[in-house]
Image (tube, rainbow, N blue to C red):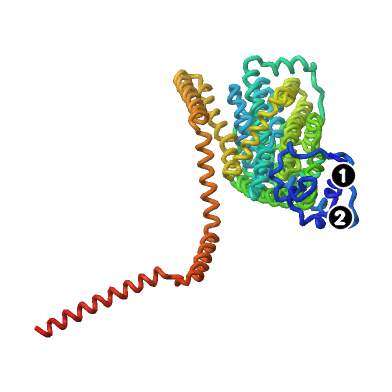
Amino acid sequence: MSTTEAQDTTKSETTPVGEDSAVKSRKDRPTGSTHFGDADWDEERPDEIGDATWGEVAKACCVHDAKEWGKIFVGACGALFFLYFFLFALELLGNSAKVLGGCRAGGLLSDETNPVAGLVIGELATALIQSSSTTTSIIVSLVGAEAISVNTGIYLVMGANIGTSVTNTIVSMGQMADGAQLERAFAGATVHDIFNLLSVAILFPLEVISHYLYHLTNAMLPDSVGDGEKWEGPIKKIVSPFAGRVLKSNKDVIKDIATGKVENCDAYYPVLCLDGIEDYKHCASKCDKDAGEEVGVDCGRVGLITCDKTTGCPAFFQNGANLHDDSISGGVCLVLSLFLLIVCLMGLVNVLQRGLAGMSTRIIYKATNVNGLIGIVIGAAITILVQSSSITTSVLTPFVGLGVIQLEQMLPLTLGANIGTTITGLLAAMVSDNVDALQVALCHLFFNISGIVIWYPIPIMRRIPLRGARALGRATRRSRLVPPIYIIVVFFVIPLLLLGLSSLFMQKTVGFTVLGSFLVIGVVLGIARFIWWWKKQEGLQKCLACLDRRTDMNSTMKTLPEDMQFLKSKVSLLAEHTGLPEDEEAGDAQKGSDGTADDVAAENEEVAGGDKNE
């Protein structure tokens, strides 16, 4: 770029939005630079974005007058406001999911299973409680308590890695109002899914055959593990107390059912608070069985909803509640959290759009285009702070939808989030004081590292998840039903199908084994037939054509009233121009009917006259 062009570009990029409001396309700018909010913003490809200098980035970021700084301050406060309640909604969503799915998740994690069932159970449990950190912590605790073996724990954490990406995929649906934003956001969310699925597709059979993760981590284990303390990230300390005042889930229920201390959730009901006082001491304090304390006399009893030592009992806690009451409370909070999540997402996106309006894509791309390794480190650091990969990827997904973060930058950030979420399991292993628990936590870490080594460093391998995510994003342009169908099929239908097939082989009877074998053969043949139809018989084109027809039909139905009014106005103008009456056909029909009536009357008169003459 020449010096003159650079100066013109810098001037244009630092011009206040109001002064450049007349220019809304890169075609109207001498430099051809695209600015955020342009009409042709979506038409620019990443390889068309020019390179900016860090001096231009610093000038666009820091050189403003007093009025602009005031707008920036107000925008930053608005963004922080919506971001806080967005995180609050995610925390409330997680608590609600644990209340609704805690009993089922604990039951899923309770038994020794085969590798396929372990993988699926880990995924389903994480999808139900919306937290891989919680799932991995429970898995580590189960291994530490010798309730499950290390090998089963490895397959469970592999499944948890898949289930953790359901949250940001749900968040991407919050940008359905804008087709371009939805395409980018859904691609940014599903790149995490595809990477995890591809990693499992390679490493799961490798682990089943060779047990390489088991042997690798076994060689690294110390002789013993000292007691550690549970660490809570700063974001959790800021958000969790507020969410805990609305609803706080009892994680001990999942652990107790999984370890076999209780058979089901009925053992925790009805909720009992001593003397009817609803606080932590009278409701949630645990009995010392060694000292002979009894529930209802010396301590209370809580169910899926519990109280906190510092904030007390939440708003949805109820003394005397049964399992049905707590489930209803969890369902209400789930709906409220989803509503708040969408509202905060819309507010955050709107604030960011206003703040970035008029900013050149060159500046945005330069500021966010960091080295892949640095992106992985940033993603890991953020996840360690918030102690949840779901929160990290969910917060980044709207930025991808806006186009602030490119898909190529989102991938290393999500890989770093996968690394960061393993820290929670390592911390749980430190608390458990068990070498086997530490081994499972290390397996989780090296599983994610192995996936990164396979799919990220080599460009041709890196393009596979990126292309898959872009293809899914483009599919949302044809139908808004793609995201919900994708979530239902990938995270629930397929896992339940695999779990059902694997359960047949777990019965250890000849009949079920033969039946399972035939069903597996049938599924494999069905998948092969589908691939043949998809690739060789134009199945892809037929599906796309069907989606296009539905999209055209929906758009036609939406604009049909306006189109009819437009046609009527044109017909009226045409009638005025030609001098024809507006309802000529009706007039002709009326004349025809009148003429027919006159003819009939004349015939009757002739008949009457003839009769008189006779």
Q: Residue reaching furthest left?
A: 614
The residue nearer to you, when weighing 584 against 177, is 584
Considering the numbered disc 2 on the image, is that residue within a helix, a strand or a loop? helix
Residue 325 picture location, percent across and down: 61, 47
**Quarter placement of the N terminus:** top right
Binning the other alpha carbons within 10 Å of mark 1 as few (below 14), some (14 to 19) or many (20 upward) gives few
Q: Classify residue 232 by image quadrant.
A: top right
Report the Cα–Cα distance between label 1 and label 2.
26 Å
Q: Classify residue 447 by image quadrant.
A: top right
Residue 609 left/right relative to 499: left
Q: Nearer the viewer, mark 1 or mark 2?
A: 1
The answer to whether 386 is drawn above or below residue 209 in the figure is: below
The residue nearer to you, when weighing 59 against 380, is 59
Residue 384 picture location, percent across and down: 79, 34
Q: Classify residue 366 by image quadrant.
A: top right
Q: Name the mark on residue 218.
A: none
Q: Amino acid at mark 1?
A: Thr
Q: Residue at (59%, 42%) from the top-left corner?
A: 484
Residue 109 picture location, percent across and down: 63, 29
The residue nearer to you, when weighing 67 against 606, is 606
Binning the other alpha carbons within 10 Å of mark 2 as few (below 14), some (14 to 19) or many (20 upward) gives few
The answer to whether residue 93 is visible is yes
Residue 117 picture location, percent across and down: 58, 26
The answer to whether 597 is drawn above or below residue 119 in the figure is: below
The residue nearer to you, when weighing 602 against 555, is 602
Q: Which residue is mark 1?
A: 4
The answer to whether residue 333 is visible is no
Mark with earlier residue (1, 2): 1
Q: Name the mark on residue 68.
A: 2
Q: Amino acid at mark 2?
A: Glu
